[in-house]
Image (tube, rainbow, N blue to C red):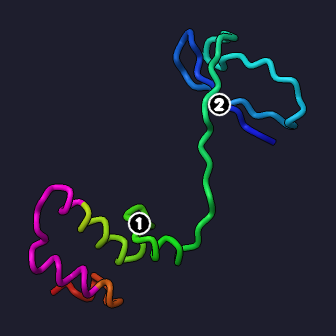
Amino acid sequence: MPIYEYRCNDCSRRSSLFIRSIGTALVPACTHCGSGDLARLMSTFSRSRSAQDVHNSGSSSAPYDDPRNIGRNVESHFEKQGMELPGELRERIDAARDGESPKSLQD
């Protein structure tokens, strides 16, 4: 059951068309303006990854419920700005990586 994506050449909006079977004849029309003048787009796809895969990849897009990922994101933002992490922040990130909860680091 594929989903095909098109960009309308008249209104420039994107339409997604769900097809029940690959063998179904398709006469696409824009879901916004009804035009039949559409250009087919490359559809995106995804792959399932376990939480461990995400952590091992070092991705900053990993879920925020894990303190290690929050630290990666903060480090990434400081690096993009060409700034060094303040010492106290570096200590907190390192402690979180060692499994210490940020709440226990407060006063």
In the rendered structure, which segment of residues is drawn in magenta? 77-95
**Chief SS of the magenta region:** helix
Viewer-proximal residue among 9 and 33 = 9
Q: Count of labels shown?
A: 2
Seen at 26% across and 63% down, the residue is 76
In the rendered view, would you say 40 is above or below 38?
below
- Amino acid type indicated by mark 2: Glu
Residue at disc 1, secondary structure: loop
Question: On the image, numbered disc 1 is attached to which residue?
Answer: 59
Task: Count residues near mark 1 (Cα–Cα under 10 Å), then give few for <14, some for 14-19, many for 20+.
Answer: some
Seen at 71% across and 16% down, the residue is 29
Q: Is residue 32 left or right of residue 89?
A: right
In the rendered view, would you say 101 is above or below 70?
below
Q: Is residue 69 left or right of residue 5?
A: left
Question: On the image, numbered disc 2 is attached to which residue?
Answer: 5
Q: How far, Cα to Cα, is label 2 from label 1?
A: 28 Å
Q: Position of residue 47 (x, y in %)?
A: 62, 59
Seen at 11% across and 62% down, the residue is 83
Viewer-proximal residue among 19 and 80 = 80
Quadrant for residue 67, please give it.
bottom left
Q: Quadrant of the C terminus?
A: bottom left
Residue at disc 2, secondary structure: strand
- Amino acid type indicated by mark 1: Ser
Viewer-proximal residue among 106 and 12 = 12
Q: Position of residue 56 (x, y in %)?
A: 46, 76
